Image (spheres, rainbow, N blue to C red):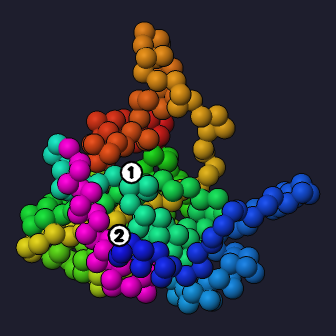
Amino acid sequence: MAQTATARLERPGARTGPPPARASAPERLTETRQPFDLSDRMTAEVARLDMAQNVHDMQEQGYTILRDVASSEFTRHLRKTCLRLAEETDGKAKGRSAALLLGRDPIFEDVVLRPKIQTLAEIMCGKGALLSQLIASIRPLGAPKLPLHADQNWLPAPFPVHNQLLTLCWACDEFTEAGGCTKVIPGTHRLRRHPNDEEVANEPGAMPTECPAGSVVAWDGSVWHGNYPRAIPGKRVVLHITFSRLALRPVEDYGHLDDEWLEGKPYPLRVMLGREDFLGSTTINRGHADYTHLVRTFNWAKT
């Protein structure tokens, strides 16, 4: 707990106390701001955090590597926490995955509130971006590669001009090709589509995102990426953080309608309430989403 307290104290710019009061006057609707057309406030924040190159990389290459996000001590404690919580997962994912991490240890609040992460999330997913996923993965020697894909896999092509999803991987161990790091194909975000079967098989232009432990590798929802098989001893511990735009969040939340209410009711009700896709299906015990619905979700999204 002492390490966690230290980690919390080191977070710069943390807000304490109650949230700011709402403005009394009604807000004015503004015009759509185009991608990478940053406001004066955001431009100043990028300069303050020395992130100009990161923003340039995201715009031109579709990915970037954030440095100096936290201390080495913080990353070591994060790694230990991910490993500990992965042991609380049941079944085949025990020791390999830990999910729904926000609220399970205070360190994850510190992670998602890091200024560089918050800034990149707003640039790539807009003001009001939602935390979509916070999950740890542990890959031992022999872990296979992850095939090439775009994270916006439940969006039909062509992908929107405005990016919908931002993924960040906090490397708790050094990222190397032999160690099973993420691979990307720079510039593929401009294609605004999924890779085809031939591209998945051949991975033209793929390159490793090699970087020291404590770095955060980030990419937009359109860039093609995967990872390499792990060919060296030890474990690759990564915290995956995903943000999404608020645009398609339901106006009404029907989470209170449980399986008992749905019992015996027509199947389309399950579909329209999202009970037949993989989104929102992650549990702590399972350690990940319900992958039996994964392909169905992606196929439905492309109709």
- Magenta span contains residue 216: no
Tell me which amino acid carries mark 2: Met
Q: Which residues are magenta?
A: 62-90
Look at the picture and state if 162 lies above or below 258.
Answer: below
The residue positioned 70% from the left and 62% from the top of the image is 19
Q: Which residue is mark 2?
A: 1
Which residue appears farthest toward the top when viewing the image?
A: 264
Q: Which mark is residue 100?
A: 1
- Work out whether residue 77 can be spotted: yes
The residue positioned 42% from the left and 13% from the top of the image is 263
Look at the picture and state if 249 lies above or below 50.
Answer: above
Q: Are marks 2 and 1 in contact (CB under 8 Å)?
A: no
- Magenta span contains residue 83: yes
- Work out whether residue 221 can be spotted: no
Q: Quadrant of residue 29?
A: bottom right
Question: Label 2 to label 1, Cα distance in Å?
Answer: 20 Å
State the residue in front, 142 or 67. Answer: 67
* Nearer-N-terminus badge (2/1): 2
Binning the other alpha carbons within 10 Å of mark 2 as few (below 14), some (14 to 19) or many (20 upward) gives: few
Relative image position of residue 125 (x, y in whole percent): 59, 62
Look at the picture and state if 276 lies above or below 88.
Answer: above
Relative image position of residue 136 (x, y in whole percent): 31, 60
